[in-house]
Image (cartoon, rainbow, N blue to C red):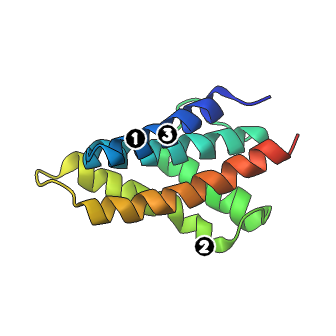
Amino acid sequence: MKSGFYEKAKRGIDDAEMLFNAERYEAAANRAYYACFHAAIALLKRFGIEHPKHPHDWIQAQFSAEIIHRRKIFPKALASSLPNIQTVRHLADYREESISKSIVAKQLKEAKVFYNSLTTYLEQTP
């Protein structure tokens, strides 16, 4: 059974792509991050690792420690993806200046790799 966070991740990555294509780069960066964040929550839940408030730093730390380093489900390179994607979201959300298409394109590419890795695993395992 797929969690609600899995479904949110799926909608989020689709929204990110659509917003990017509509040249709404700040919104695309935001949705790309949250798609990955929700996918990470869904994966952690699969292993019974949950926090009622879903703090971003806790989710990132648990993903890296439990999923990457302890269980070795994904390569170590994926450990920095969620923080990298969040950094671009922060630039998009909290800077006065507009974010460039090229920065968001790179973020969206990394987000798709992260998202696809996690959702493929979720779909292939009971």
Q: Name which residue type carries label 1.
A: Met
* Residue placed under numbered mark 2 in the picture: 77
The correct choice, above or below, for 1 with respect to 37 in the image is above
Q: In the displayed image of the protein, which residue is found farthest to the left? A: 96
Q: Position of residue 55 (x, y in %)?
A: 49, 41
* Residue placed under numbered mark 3 in the picture: 14
* Residue placed under numbered mark 1 in the picture: 18
Residue 77 sits in quarter: bottom right
Q: CA distance from mark 1 to mark 2?
A: 27 Å
Q: Position of residue 71 (x, y in %)?
A: 80, 61
Q: Name which residue type carries label 3.
A: Asp
The correct choice, above or below, for 49 with respect to 79 in the image is above
Q: Position of residue 14 (x, y in %)?
A: 49, 39
> Could you tell me if the residues under marks 1 and 2 are in contact, i.e. CB atoms within 8 Å?
no
* Mark 1 / mark 2, whichever is N-terminal: 1
Q: Quadrant of the C terminus?
A: top right
